[in-house]
Amino acid sequence: MSWTDPTITAGVTLIRRVHLTELRSFLDEARSTLSLPAVVYTDPTITAGSTTIKAQHILDLRSGVQ
């Protein structure tokens, strides 16, 4: 996998739109490869500058890998 923002290091606390959208995309691809159903995301579209990142967005990802 190739990440758009590969410079994330320990201590970085800013979550960007690109982080969520890429994680979702790679998770969806992996689940499809494994013939698992798609994850239903709380906010299917994350819009830069207007969507507030919520704990539920992270929980959606976590539940998708369990």
Image (cartoon, rainbow, N blue to C red):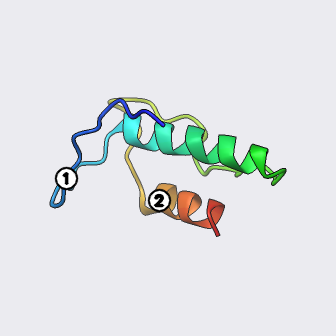
Q: Residue furthest left?
A: 11
Dot 2 alpha-carbon crowd within 10 angstroms: few under 14, some 14 to 19, many 20 or more: some
Q: CA distance from mark 2 to mark 1?
A: 18 Å
Q: How many marks?
A: 2
The disc label shown at residue 58, or none: 2
Circle on res. 9 = 1
63 with respect to 39 (left or right): left
**For numbered disc 1, what is the local secondary structure?**
loop
Disc 1 crowd rating (10 Å Cα; few below 14, some 14-19, many 20+) is few
Quarter holding residue 44: top right
Q: Position of residue 7 (x, y in %)?
A: 21, 40
Which label is found at residue 60?
A: none
The correct choice, above or below, for 63 with respect to 7 in the image is below
Seen at 47% across and 59% down, the residue is 58
Secondary structure category for the residue under label 2: helix
What residue occupies the far bottom of the structure in this picture? 66
Residue 65 image offset from top left, x and y in percent: 62, 63
Q: Which residue lies at the image location 58% right of the left edge and 59% below the top edge?
A: 60
**What residue sits 62% from the left and 66% below the top?**
63
Amino acid carrying mark 2 in the image: Ile
Is label 2 or label 1 in front? 1
Residue 14 versus residue 5 in the image, above or below: below
Q: Nearer the viewer, residue 41 or 30?
A: 30
Q: Who comes first in sequence, dot 2 or dot 1?
A: 1
Q: Residue at x 58, y 38 (%)?
A: 25
User: 17 or 51: nearer the eye?
Assistant: 17
Instruction: Looking at this view, name the residue that lies furthest to the front.
Output: 1
Who is closer to the viewer here, 43 or 59?
A: 59
Q: Is residue 30 left or right of residue 49?
A: right
The amino acid pointed to by label 1 is Thr
Q: Position of residue 34 (x, y in %)?
A: 78, 52
Left or right: residue 54 versus residue 62 is: left
